[in-house]
Image (spheres, coloured by chain):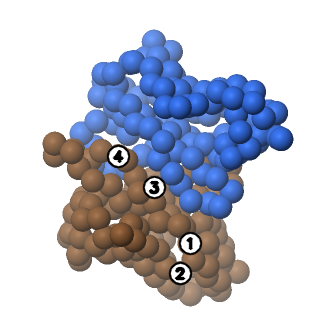
Chain colours: A blue, B brown
């Protein structure tokens, strides 16, 4: 069975600071997909990124970047120059390849950006 | 383009009552799923479907029933509501790419259910 651990329950930083959200996953499958989702205070869930297990290249999208390291089973998410609008709960998730079922989510990290 | 639509957004039930949470998507996605979100627990998969007529259980299926008679609709039924089913419920759909589920979920806005 797979598992996703987000050890940081809550992080609070001041605006413009950089912040990294940690995600550690467990799976015995060699083919799998990792995801990050954002849930702002309004409650909807927004897809941010998907990464497959064969692609370890880091990805950058504006102020967001993701660091995937198979050696440590981690898929960390960094926000550079954080803004108040980044305040949300962020979920890391895992799905094994070839599976038709849903995602296994971590418990989420509540990120608070203070002005 | 409405995406994934869930109704109702809020519902209060008494223990033992039954109800159905409706979910519809207009993106012609093959895959649909239901999750529940509880404080400190993240999202947990209740049931999922890979296409019309095909459903399967997720991590926490007890007390819930689903059916998928069309590609668009995936209702979740609570057979006899219990206080432990107080939660926020999310319906999601996803599409396939090269025959496999991408896992990129499109979520509805959520349905907040309280069971007294």
Q: The disc numbered 2 marks a residue on which chain?
A: B
Identity of the residue drawn at 75% across and 30% down = A16
Q: Which is more N-terminal, label 4 or label 2?
A: 2
Label 3–label 1 contact, CB within 8 A: no
Q: Which residue is mark 3?
A: B45
| Pointer 3 chain | B
Nearer the viewer's eye, disc 2 or disc 3? 2
SS state under label 2 = loop
Look at the numbered discs 2 and 4 and tell me whether their residues touch, using CB distance below 8 Å. Answer: no
Mark 4–mark 3 distance (CA, rounded to whole Å): 13 Å
Residue in front for this viewpoint, A39 or A108: A39
Do callouts 1 and 2 mark residues in contact (Cβ within 8 Å)?
Answer: yes
Label placed on residue B111: 1
Give the side of residue A85 with respect to residue B31, left or right. Answer: right
- Relative vertical location of residue B72 with respect to residue A86 in this rendering, above or below: below
Is residue A114 visible from the viewing direction of this image? yes
Measured Cα–Cα span from mark 4 to mark 1: 21 Å
Quadrant of image for the N terminus of chain A: top left
Res B79 seen here: no
Name the quadrant containing residue A108.
top right
């Amino acid at each position: 069975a797979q598992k996703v651990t987000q050890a940081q329950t809550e992080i609070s930083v001041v605006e413009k600071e950089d912040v990294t959200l940690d995600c550690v996953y467990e799976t015995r499958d060699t083919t799998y997909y990792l995801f990050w989702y954002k849930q702002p205070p309004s409650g909807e869930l927004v897809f941010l990124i998907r990464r497959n297990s064969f692609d370890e290249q880091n990805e950058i999208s504006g102020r967001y970047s993701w660091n995937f390291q198979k050696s440590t089973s981690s898929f960390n998410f960094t926000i550079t120059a954080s803004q108040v609008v980044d305040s949300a709960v962020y979920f890391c998730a895992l799905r094994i390849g070839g599976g038709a079922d849903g995602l296994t989510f971590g418990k989420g990290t509540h990120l608070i950006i203070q002005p | 383009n409405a995406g994934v639509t869930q109704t109702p957004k809020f519902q209060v039930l008494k223990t033992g009552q039954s109800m159905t949470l409706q979910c519809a998507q207009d993106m012609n996605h093959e895959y649909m799923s239901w999750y529940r979100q509880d404080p400190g627990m993240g999202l947990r998969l209740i049931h999922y479907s890979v296409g019309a007529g095909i459903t399967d259980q997720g991590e926490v299926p007890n007390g819930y029933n689903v059916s998928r008679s069309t590609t668009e609709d995936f209702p979740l039924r609570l057979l006899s509501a219990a206080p432990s089913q107080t939660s926020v419920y999310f319906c999601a759909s996803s599409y396939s790419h090269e025959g496999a589920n991408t896992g990129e979920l499109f979520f509805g806005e959520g349905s907040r259910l309280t069971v007294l």
